[in-house]
Structures are given as structure tokens and as C-alpha cells.
Amino acid sequence: MLLRPNERAKLDDTDDNQFYIEPRFVTHVDPGFIQQLTDLYHLHLKPQMRILDLMSSWVSHLPEEIEFAHVEGHGLNASELARNPRLDHYFVQNLNANPKLPLADAEFDAVINCVSVQYLQ
């Protein structure tokens, strides 16, 4: 099902960067969801893969026992991303303002996005 533009409109059209000025070290989902997500990642993500974690935060819910070749994080708050122990590198970019990623084509084996895709306009 595709949403019409009016169904994707934000109630608050303030610049997303303003909302993310202050870090929020909170978990937006319950422990059961986190376990199911981690189990799903464990099933599909393999050791030494290169992972792009879009719209990340201070936690990625990646299985601790899997060592990846590289995990690149993206988000809107540098303080949150800096505290994420799974990220090898990160960058801050508002994808609604600039959807072009500063990354090479075919650089990653998998892209993950947890509970944030709804923020893309």
C-alpha cells in the first residue's frame, strides 16, 4: 500500500535537526521487541558482513556475539551515535533535507533500520 503525500505529512513541520539537538538515551521499544529484533538480526546477518545502520542511535540491537567487518552508523545526533559500541564509524545527516548518502555504491552487505523509517518524508 502506498501512502499519498497528505498521509505522509508531519503534524510538526519543524526542522528535524531541531528535535535531535539534545541526545535522548532512551529505548523506544520493549525488551520483547528487542529480543525478537536481535534474533532476526542473528538469523540474517553473518560474521564479517559490512552493515549500514540507518537512523541509528546509542544502541543498534545487533547480536553481541557476531563480529562484523564494519558497522557504519547514520543518525541525527552525534552524541547518541558516539555512545553506540557497535559502530565503527558514523555520520550525521538529515535524510529529509539531503537523501544522498556520502557512501560508495555496493559498500555494504546489509542495511538495517529499526523503528525510524516512518520519519522519512
Image (tube, rainbow, N blue to C red):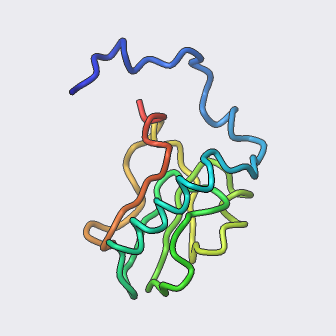
| Quadrant of the rendered image containing residue 79 | bottom right
Residue 19 x %, y %? 69, 33
Residue 70 lies, with reference to residue 119, above or below; the image says: below
Residue 29 lies, with reference to residue 67, above or below; the image says: above
Give the farthest residue toward the front: 32
Residue 49 x %, y %? 36, 81
Q: Nearer the viewer, residue 55 or 93?
A: 55
Q: Residue at x 64, y 37 (%)?
A: 17
Q: Residue at x 66, y 67 (%)?
A: 84
Residue 59 lies, with reference to residue 17, above or below; the image says: below
Residue 104 lies, with reference to residue 67, above or below; the image says: above
Say whether residue 121 is left or right of residue 25: left
Quadrant location of the N terminus in the rendered image: top left
Residue 110 x %, y %? 33, 68
Q: Nearer the viewer, residue 117 or 15?
A: 117
Count of all numbered marks drawn on residues in the image: 0
Residue 86 x %, y %? 59, 74
Say whether residue 102 is left or right of residue 55: left
| Quadrant of the rendered image containing residue 83 | bottom right
Say whether residue 88 is left or right of residue 69: right
Give the farthest residue toward the left: 1
Q: Nearer the viewer, residue 110 or 44?
A: 44
Q: Residue at x 53, y 64 (%)?
A: 73
Q: Residue at x 63, y 62 (%)?
A: 59
